[in-house]
Image: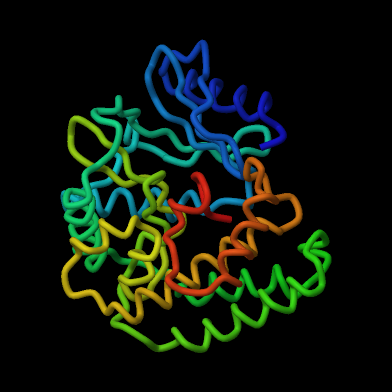
Amino acid sequence: MPDLARATDAAIAIAASLGLPADDAIVLHNSNKLALRLEPCGVMARVAHVGEEVAELEVDVARQLADRGSPVAALAPPRDGPAVHVRDGFAVTLWVYYEPAAPAVAPGAYARALGRLHAGMRAVDGAFPRFTDRIAEAERVVAEPELSPGLPDDERAFLGGRLRRLHEAVEGTGREQLLHGEPHPGNLLSTHDGPLFIDLETCCRGPVEFDLAHVPTRVAEHYPGVDRELLDRCRELVLAMVAAWRWEKGDQFPDGRRFGDELLRVLRAGPPWPTLDGVVPRPVGP
């Protein structure tokens, strides 16, 4: 986020207005969105430009899942009143900050946590986009040169054709339910309360294989009842979608253009399709 200082000041001011002492902010992640650890209150603030986030949806889903005991990060107190705060053009949400309990979550525990999340999501109320809407967004980035001016013409033709083919291949496949949308390792915390998922802005409806395409191979091996053919197709699809986002004008992903090139190389190389954790660092989304 280019407006780091203003965004940080907005988060600190909002926390202070809620009685949460925040004299300092530690940047946890900064790309298209900003995550800050506010001190000394120990709260995590998620900050985005107003209009470039779906914070109300994320908060609503988080509350519904927490009520069902699903493995998600909790909103920070106070929990009464609005949970999305707007200041100086930024939308800010405040969450509990969890001290890391271990370097990573074991594959079996990761798969079980994702299964519990999916079970809770089947009971969540609300209107959500389909996962194919996200494919269409990636297709648009590739199809319109003004949205991806740096993408060479030959790569534009290749990536656009690959996205169209994959869109057609996954349309109407699998049994659809509400998904996380991007449950990759960067969105799973290892805490003393167990594995907890964060960043629910990407929720969409689709087959669980679309979620599983974002997780390491060993995690997917522990998830029961997987359509392996559909999972393989979704892995290729996720590689193509992320490649499109890395070429989008204004993308803030660190060293994103290099990883856009690498993803195109992987797609041209063909199967077996790697998972994203083996190709690019986190985060991976738009």
Residue 49 vs residue 221, the one in the foreground: 221
In the rendered structure, the answer to whether residue 169 lies left or right of residue 247 reads left
Q: x, y percentage for residue 133? A: 53, 74
Residue 85 vs residue 188, the one in the foreground: 188
Q: x, y percentage for residue 181? A: 41, 61
In the rendered structure, the answer to whether residue 173 lies left or right of residue 193 reads right
The quadrant in which the C terminus is found is: bottom right
Number of numbered discs overlaid on the protein picture: 0
* Residue in the image at 52% along x and 34% along y: 29
Question: Eyeballing the image, is 81 above or below 138?
Answer: above
In the rendered structure, the answer to whether residue 4 lies left or right of residue 173 reads right
In the rendered structure, the answer to whether residue 163 lies left or right of residue 189 reads right
| Residue farthest along the front direction in this orientation | 269
**Residue 73 sits in quarter:** top left
Q: x, y percentage for residue 103? A: 30, 32
Question: Eyeballing the image, is 38 above or below 256?
Answer: above
**Residue 254 sits in quarter:** top right
Residue 137 vs residue 106, the one in the foreground: 106
**Residue 228 sits in quarter:** bottom left
Q: x, y percentage for residue 166? A: 52, 82
Residue 130 vs residue 107, the one in the foreground: 107
The quadrant in which the N terminus is found is: top right
* Residue in the image at 59% along x and 42% along y: 48
Instruction: Give the colouring mode of the picture.
Output: rainbow
* Residue in the image at 65% along x and 82% along y: 161
